[in-house]
Image: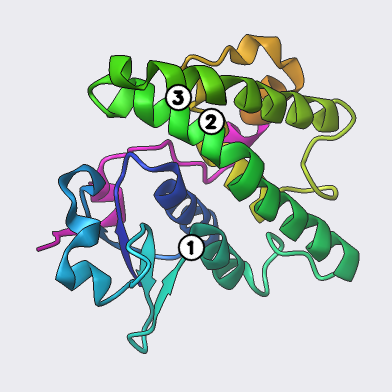
Amino acid sequence: MIVYGDSRSGNCYKIALLARHLGITLEWREVDVLSGATRSDWFLSINPFGKLPVVELDDDTHLAESNAVLCYLAEGTAWWPDERLLRAEVLQWLFWEQYSHEPYIATVRFWVALSGQPEAHTSQIARCRPQGERALRRMDGHLRERRWLVGGHPTIADIALFAYTHVAEEGGYRLDDYPAVLAWLDRMQGLPEHMPMQTPRALWQPAHPCP
């Protein structure tokens, strides 16, 4: 399976992390999102939405949107529950992550740590940070009485939320303020096949650059 992704992106990391847990070998093709490559003709030919990540399946089908890819890969595994209500609860967290978490946690991290000009985004950071804090409080309250977001073992809901939560401090958020979230992060990182973000791409070999 070929994955087009930027190794700094939490959305791309989700795919690599779940694949590691499932024992799926990836061919990682690095795409530098900051270079404008996702707006190029070659990239738009595989994903007209112009976003990372994109997965190329064995039949040359291209699948985009990180959480959709998680659902596809997890089908038939313990990461995607069999029980109808639990599956709906997983989807509930996946939708929430993209609407109420990622736009604030991930975007602030990008402005602060990756954009190269955080001072140009001071007003946007100030507007987004309260929403990011609200998302972390929501997670912390939920995890006080639970080990995992849904059910009795980790699911793709945990993968999706782990991706940007564990690097939230790069955007200036204080995870020490959310002890239940910190404990959950420790549990995720303690899973046997856990792989840190930005692990050298040798672990995802063979890796090839993109045009």
- Residue wearing tag 1: 65
Left or right side of 118 for 80: right
Q: Residue at x 62, y 36 (%)?
A: 188
Q: Residue at x 68, y 26 (%)?
A: 136
Q: Considering the numbered disc 3 on the image, is that residue within a helix, a strand or a loop?
A: helix
- Colour pattern of the rendering: rainbow
Mark 3 surroundings within 10 Å by alpha-carbon count, few (fewer than 14), some (14 through 19), many (20 or more): some
Amino acid type shown at disc 3:
Gln
Amino acid type shown at disc 1:
Glu
Q: Real-space Cα distance between discs 2 and 1?
A: 18 Å
Q: In the rendered structure, which disc, 2 or 3, sits on the residue that comes first in sequence?
A: 2
Amino acid type shown at disc 2:
Ile
Q: Real-space Cα distance between discs 1 and 3?
A: 25 Å
Q: Residue at x 77, y 48 (%)?
A: 153
Vertical placement of residue 59 versus 121, above or below: below
- Residue wearing tag 3: 124
The magenta-colored residue range is 186-211
Q: Residue at x 32, y 63 (%)?
A: 50
Give the position of the C terminus as an image quadrant. bottom left
Disc 1 to disc 3: CB gap under 8 Å: no
Indicate the position of residue 124 as horizontal and vertical percent values.
45, 24
Q: Real-space Cα distance between discs 2 and 3?
A: 12 Å
Q: Considering the numbered disc 1 on the image, is that residue within a helix, a strand or a loop?
A: loop
Q: Considering the numbered disc 2 on the image, is that residue within a helix, a strand or a loop?
A: helix
- Residue wearing tag 2: 105
Residue 90 location, quadrant:
bottom right
Q: Is residue 11 magenta?
A: no
Q: In the rendered structure, which disc, 1 or 3, sits on the residue that comes first in sequence?
A: 1
Mark 2 surroundings within 10 Å by alpha-carbon count, few (fewer than 14), some (14 through 19), many (20 or more): many
Left or right side of 13 for 149: right
Q: Is residue 204 magenta?
A: yes
